[in-house]
Image (cartoon, rainbow, N blue to C red):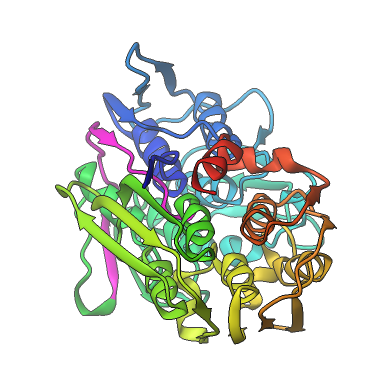
Amino acid sequence: MTALRVPGDKSIAHRGLMLAALAAGTSRLGNVPDGLDVQSTQRAMRALGATLHVAGDGALIVAGCGGAFTAPAGPIDCGNSGTTMRLLTGLLATRAIDVTLTGDASLQSRPMRRVAGPLAAFGARIDLSGGGTAPMRVRGNPDARGAEVAVTVASAQVKSALLLAALGAHGRTRLSGELATRDHTERLLRAFGVPVDSAGGMLAIEGPAVLRATDLDVPGDISSAAFLFAAAAAVPGASVTVDDLGLNPTRTAFLDVLRRFGASVDVVPHADGAEPRGSVTVYGAPLKGIAIEPVEVPGLIDELPLVGVLGGFALGTTTVRGAAELRVKESDRIDAFAAAARALGIAVDTAPDGFAVHGPAQWHDGDVVTHHDHRIAMAFSVAARAAGVRLQLDDPDCAAVSFPNFAAALDAVL
């Protein structure tokens, strides 16, 4: 059986870097992934006055600003990272700072009103392009008062931006509404010494909050491991184990999806810290089609292209509904998925909020346009390898955004 490790969880790393940069004192962050998205957050924290260096053991040492960010020399380039841009907007919304956030062409096409709108509750001035996208100018309000905000989009990035803004506001901030998304920000705030009240289905923080520097070991990224799990699941008799993997319950829905498809999944929890972790083994088996309902989508948003790929190996129809959010990711992932699927012989129908895959596919060699989207590139690399067909990607290197050594890891599975 193949036992592997995957890069550290980038969702946790983004948040850990920002909180360490905000804190007073020096934090040690272990297993920080070196993908391009997290590098964007590191550059942003340096631009705002934090000091970062790599220790001899590979850990990232962050000397924080104690809440007093310095104005950068120019715009902060967030690269392709929507998480960097959206969370940074919240972090700066209640600080005495005036900064422009920009990014690559893909990031500048993604919607930012969903963050800018709710942050207006703190009196921040956030100017967007005419299309509601970046570049965006953030003029923070250091005199912000705590606010009552209803979160209307089931997005961990929106929720996190508001929680980060609450750290600098005066008084109690309380969030309600669509809060059932990944909870890394809440967990890490507590690790950095900030109480987060989650009673009554709401989230509340008293500000201004003083963060305590801490040490954090980032577990492996389950969204990266999902590609290796899918590769094993699609081939009866194949298997893979991933060690030291993050098992946050808001992120493990894909493991249940694999079981519903027909694969076997064994989970061995390890010692808990700020984030639960453990080892996961997946065994391949004949697959059957499943249905993903809208209520499941927030917990699977990064893995939905893989759900579609597995549908190509399954008997029957696999459907995804309620996933219009896919259309505003790094690419329009519904259309990008459908075009790539058809290029390899998967029969697929699309809808405004999802797709239906009719399996099993009539696999054949094909060329796939990734739209520079790392998850499309990796999902169809899995598909081609498991199906035994030739794949030509227009941008295979885009996987480095989240999983720099993905090709070698996939080689180790199949």
Q: Is residue 163 left or right of residue 390?
A: left
At 78% from the left and 55% from the top, the residue drawn is 129
Residue at far front of view: 237
Residue 128 spot, x, y in % from top left: 72, 55
Q: Tell me what residue is drawn at x 35 percent, y 50 percent.
A: 241
Residue 73 position, x and y percent, is 65, 22
Q: Position of residue 16 (x, y in %)?
A: 37, 40
Report the label total. 0
Is residue 105 visible in the rendered image? The answer is: yes
Q: Is residue 46 magenta?
A: no
Q: Choose between 168 and 239: the one closer to the eye.
A: 239
Q: Is residue 413 above or below residue 196?
A: above
Residue situated in front as seen by the camera: 105 or 140: 105
Residue 359 % position (x, y): 66, 81
Magenta highlight range = 202-223
Q: Is residue 214 magenta?
A: yes
Task: Tell whether 414 sits left or right of 346.
Answer: left
Residue at (30% x, 57% y) in the render: 247
Q: Is residue 148 visible?
A: no
Residue drawn 62% across the image and 37% down it:
400
